């Protein structure tokens, strides 16, 4: 089986759907952000604060390369990962990319007033970033799935594609 890599905006359901999909398919689930945090021993927020975005993006690129070497896994990528062509090129080696196309309204409902998503303190800026990234997700994707559905329904639809 090709690895299945989920991409999409924060709150699109990549982690929740990914875990459900891995369970359905009987394979391992990995999250690139979690792997980076484990490897670095600190939260991504701290990496950004201490070293800046460029440093984080280098770590993210290296993680995309590592994930591409894995076999039979479902992968959740960070919201920005698949907006960089080098990450897409690295990860597509042996993987199929699925874009979870959730509407901005649904994403806002899911995130709510979460303090763990500082980007959503300014909804207008978040919407601009969402609009900017959407075309990049579409360009990276081998498949596009409606991300507004429940995690279970989304995972089942993706599983059907890969059976």
Image (tube, rainbow, N blue to C red):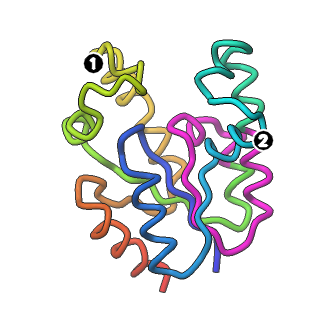
Image check: 88 left or right of 157? right
Comparing 70 with 28, the one in front is 28
- Mark 1 residue element: helix
Image check: 142 left or right of 9? right
Please tell me which residue is depicted at 54% across the width and 34% down the height of the picture: 80
Q: Which residue is mark 2?
A: 39
Q: Residue furthest front?
A: 41
Q: Quadrant of residue 104?
A: top left
For the N terminus, the quadrant is bottom right
Residue 76 in the image: state x and y as whole percent: 54, 53
Residue 31 in the image: state x and y as whole percent: 59, 51
Q: On screen, 65 above or below 81?
A: below
Q: Which residue is mark 1?
A: 123
N-term mark: 1 or 2: 2
> Which class describes the residues within 10 Å of circle 2: few (<14), some (14-19), or many (20+)?
few
- Mark 2 residue element: helix
Residue 38 in the image: state x and y as whole percent: 72, 42
Mark in front: 1 vs 2: 2
Q: Quadrant of residue 130?
A: top left
Please tell me which residue is depicted at 35% across the width and 75% down the height of the picture: 156
Image check: 161 left or right of 42? left
Magenta residues?
Answer: 61-88
Question: Is residue 78 one of those drawn in magenta?
Answer: yes
User: Distance between the Cα atoms at labels 1 and 2?
Assistant: 32 Å
Q: On screen, 42 above or below 154?
A: above
Please tell me which residue is depicted at 77% across the width and 30% down the height of the picture: 58
* Residue 58 badge: none
Q: Residue furthest bottom?
A: 163
> Which class describes the residues within 10 Å of circle 1: few (<14), some (14-19), or many (20+)?
few
Question: Is residue 116 one of those drawn in magenta?
Answer: no
Residue 63 in the image: state x and y as whole percent: 75, 45
């Amino acid at each position: 089986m090709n690895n299945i890599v989920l991409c999409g905006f924060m709150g699109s359901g990549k982690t929740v759907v990914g875990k459900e999909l891995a369970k359905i398919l009987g394979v391992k689930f990995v999250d690139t952000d979690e792997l980076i945090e484990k490897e670095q021993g600190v939260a991504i927020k701290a990496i950004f604060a201490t070293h800046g975005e460029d440093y984080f993006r280098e770590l993210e690129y290296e993680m995309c390369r590592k994930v591409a070497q894995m076999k039979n896994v479902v992968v959740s990528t960070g919201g920005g990962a698949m907006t960089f062509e080098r990450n897409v090129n690295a990860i597509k080696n042996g993987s199929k990319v699925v874009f979870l196309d959730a509407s901005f309204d649904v994403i806002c409902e899911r995130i709510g007033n979460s303090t763990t998503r500082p980007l959503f303190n300014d909804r207008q800026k978040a919407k601009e970033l969402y609009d900017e990234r959407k075309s990049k997700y579409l360009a990276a994707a081998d498949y596009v799935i409606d991300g507004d559905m429940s995690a279970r329904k989304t995972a089942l639809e993706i599983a059907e594609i890969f059976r």
